[in-house]
Image (cartoon, helix red, strand yellow):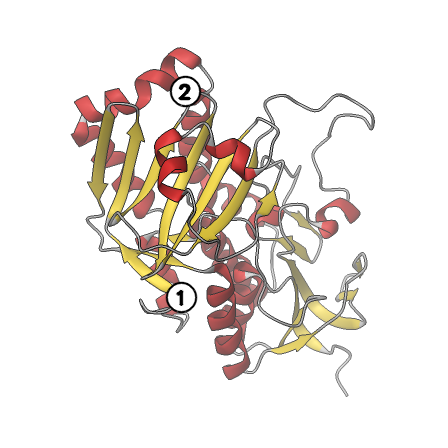
Amino acid sequence: MSRHDADLVVLGAGPVGLAVAVEAATAGLSVVVADPRSGPTDKACGEGLMPGARRALARLGVEPAPGADAMAFRGIRYLSPGHVVSADFRAGPGLGVRRTALSQALGARAAAVGVRRVAVRAGPPRQDRDGVDVAGLRARWCVAADGLHSPTRRALGLDAPRPAAGAARDPRARFGLRRHYLTAPWSEHVDVLWARDAEAYVTPVAPDVVGVAVLTCRPGDLDRQLAAFPGLQARLAGVPHASATRGAGPLRQRAVRVRAGRVLLAGDAAGYVDALTGEGITVGLATARLAVACVLADDARDYDRRWRAVSRDYRVLTEGLLLASSSPVLRRALVPAAERLPWAFRAAVDRLAAVHP
C-alpha cells in the first residue's frame, strides 16, 4: 500500500484550485481537492474572462458557452463624465460568466478526469521531506488556492507583515462589492466607470443579467457607493436584484514567498494587487499551470522566481494604474487621455487580454 493517499492535495475549490486539480489529473497525477463547501463557490468579483483566460480554460477542456449564465463581450469601455473610449480585443471576445457557473463547469471537468473532492476544512499543513499531511490526507505535494485571505499562507508564516492589531485602517485599502441586476446588458463591452475615488464595473453575464462591481476605499454599502455614478444609479433604479451583495477585501495581499517546502501557493493565495485591470482569473490559471509543472518535476525550488515571472505583467500594469489613479489630478485626466490617445488605450487593453494565455 502506498504511503501517500494522493500525489497532490489542493486546498480550495474555487476556479484556480479546480484548474490546478484538472491540470494535474490530466497529466496523470492522483488528486484530491479539499474545501469545506460541497458545491460551486461564489465570491465578489467582476466575472469577466479575458481572451487569455478563455484560451487557458479551453486547454483544460472547459469552455463555458454564451447562454443562460454567460455572455460574450467585445472589449473594454472606459467612461467618465463627458468622456467615453472603447477598445475591442484583437484576440477574440471575452466572456462574462457567473462565478458559480464557472466553478460548476470546472468542478464537472475535475470529476470527469478523476479528481476526488472532500468537504473538509483543512488545518495547517504538516510536512517532511517526503510529503505533506493536511485535511486528514497524506500527499507528495500540496497546492493552496484558498483565496485572498488564505489560512494556509497565514499558518505557514508566509503573510507579509501587516499593521498591528488595533491600528487604524489604512485609508488607501480598497474593497470590492458586487451585485447582479435583472436587466438586459446595454453594452457589448465591460464598462468601467470612473468616479473621484471609486470605479464601477458593469459586466454582461447573461442575456438578461448584468453584474455590477464597485472598487473603492470609501466605507458604505453598494447603494451608497453607486451614488458616485449618477448615470448608472439612475439606470439601475427600480431594477430587480438577481443576487445578494457580496464583498471582498482589503484587496491588496502580499506573501513574503509563495512556497514553503512542498506547499505551493497559487491564485489569490499567492498575493494580490487589485482587481482594477480584471486579470485575476487569467493570472490565477497561469500560476495553476506553473504549480503543476513543479509537482510533475518533483522539484519546486524555482517556483518563487517563476511565479514572479508569470505574474510580472499583471503586477506591473496594475501597480502602475493604481499609482496613476491615486493622484486626483491624474485620475481626472485618465479617461480623457485615453480618449485622445485611443491607440495607446487599445494597446493597453490588448496587453491585458493577452497576459499568459
Residue at image coords 45%, 49%: 283
Q: Which mark is residue 324?
A: 2
Q: Is residue 313 visible?
A: no
Three-letter residue code for mark 1: Asp
User: Picture quarter containing residue 10?
Assistant: bottom right
Q: Position of residue 176 (x, y in %)?
A: 55, 39
Other residues around mark 2 within 10 Å, as few (<14) / some (14–19) / many (≥20): some
How much space separates mark 1 and mark 2, taking CA atoms? 35 Å
Point out the residue furthest to the front here. Answer: 238
- Relative to the observer, which residue lies in front, 113 or 209? 209
Lower sequence index among marks 1 and 2: 1
User: Picture quarter containing residue 322?
Assistant: top left
Left or right of 280 in this view: 300: right
Left or right of 269 in this view: 63: left
Q: Which residue is mark 1?
A: 69
Q: Which mark is residue 247?
A: none
Residue at image coords 71%, 53%: 261
Residue at image coords 78%, 79%: 3
